[in-house]
Amino acid sequence: MIDVLLFVLGSSLMVLSAVLSLIGAVGFLRFRNFFLRLHSATVGSIGGGVYGLVGLALLTLSLDVPGYLKYYIFGVAIVSAALVVFASPTGSHILSRAAYRSGEAAPRPLIRDKLKEAGLE
Amino acid sequence: MRSRGALEELGLVLSILLGVLLTYYLVRADVVSLTYGNIPLANLYLRAVPDPSSPFTSRSPEVVTSVIWDQRGYDTYFETSVLFIAIIGVLYLAGLGGGQGNSSVSTVIPRVIAKILFPVIVAVSVSVALHGHLTPGGGFQGGSIFAVAPFLYLLVFGRRMLEGKGFRANALVFARSLAVFLITVVGSIVLVVGLLTGVPAFLFQNQPKPQLSPIGYPAYVVLPWGGIFLFSGTLMILNVLEFTAVSTGFTLALVIIDTVTGGRE
């Protein structure tokens, strides 16, 4: 019973990650300025990478394989997912901060600049 | 500007020409083959290195590390020395004297994440280096991965904090010199023993070679509880030493670059 549940959960997470990867890729190509594109790239890395890795881990746990190999793959997938969760948002944060502060990538259709209003930067 | 572009093109053409010539002669001499499945040199290494009965064995399942440290040990040793001498020379030129401890401009997010990721990177690099004789990887690869961790600290916290962590230039130069010196000692110890006992031996020899040299390093030790700890003679020792040398060397290089360019303001 728990095997079937894990299998269904893992498969749906992997399908979701595939869809989010596609959305991220299309957004990365079609959005207008740097910040919107960065947002869509993060959708690709968190939604497409982390969901897929967690889904892979659950899927592997549900398989009927003898030995320790499935726990090995489970551990590798979970650790990789954790690393991406830590590193990817930090990277996009640093990128967007550097782009905003240097003024290299101006947000072109700018409706309201809350950072400037708050006087933070 | 014009002449520099022409020079670059000339260099490109020359290197491509050299590659084509080299490939042609190696194929002519039947050392490499362009068709898949008939590659004599690769077949020789893949068969001889893990096979304990072959005279060219390294007693290691990982052929790449064996070739790097055993079959072409001279080349790797000179690579390590060249990197060592280059970094020492740059240290002389750059002069790691003062250097302002610049105030870091990063926010709290990269600070926390760098602190979390630092031990992870170090663990991965040490594992890659220690498993170098069993799985893909080795000292150079592990050392290169290790250098990412201090570089992360350098980018996020600045040089002052890195030195507070113990990554001082003097300590790094000392560790690097010690590692290169010990690589020399490990490579020449079989030759010295052979000279003292009147037995033929080679520089950078790993395993005993039947009919050529009867002495060499042991390939494994039997642990007290019955297990076997395979370290493949010099391979694991040299991997650990190379890990020390490369990690400290790359950390030094990154610190020098940060100092010469005056921080990141």
Image: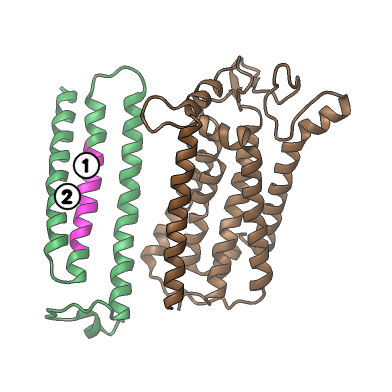
Looking at the image, which residue is at 41% across and 60% down?
Answer: B112
- Taking the magenta stretch, the answer to whether it contains residue A50 is yes
Looking at the image, which residue is at 76% across and 40% down?
Answer: B185
Residue B82 found in image quarter:
bottom right
The answer to whether marks 1 and 2 mark residues whose Cβ atoms lie closer than 8 Å is yes
Q: Which residue is mark 2?
A: A21
Q: Which SS class for mark 1?
A: helix
In the figure, the brown chain has which letter?
B
Residue type, numbered disc 1: Gly
Report if residue A118 is visible in the image: yes
Q: Nearer the viewer, residue B179 or B265?
A: B179
Query: Magenta stretch: dominant SS?
Result: helix
* Image position, residue B221 (x, y; %): 66, 21
In the figure, the green chain has which letter?
A
Viewed as shown, does residue A49 lie left or right of A5? right
* Image position, residue B252 (x, y; %): 60, 61
Badge 2 density bin: few <14, some 14–19, many ≥20, Cα 10 Å: many
Looking at the image, which residue is at 45% across and 34% down?
Answer: B27
Same chain for the residues at labels 1 and 2, yes or no?
A: yes
Q: Which residues are magenta?
A: A39-55
Q: Which residue is mark 1?
A: A52
Q: Nearer the viewer, residue A8 or B211?
A: B211
* Image position, residue B171 (x, y; %): 68, 58
Quadrant in which the C terminus of chain A appears: bottom left
Residue type, numbered disc 2: Ser
Quadrant in which the N terminus of chain A appears: top left
Report if residue B236 is visible in the image: no
Q: Nearer the viewer, residue B82 or B263?
A: B82
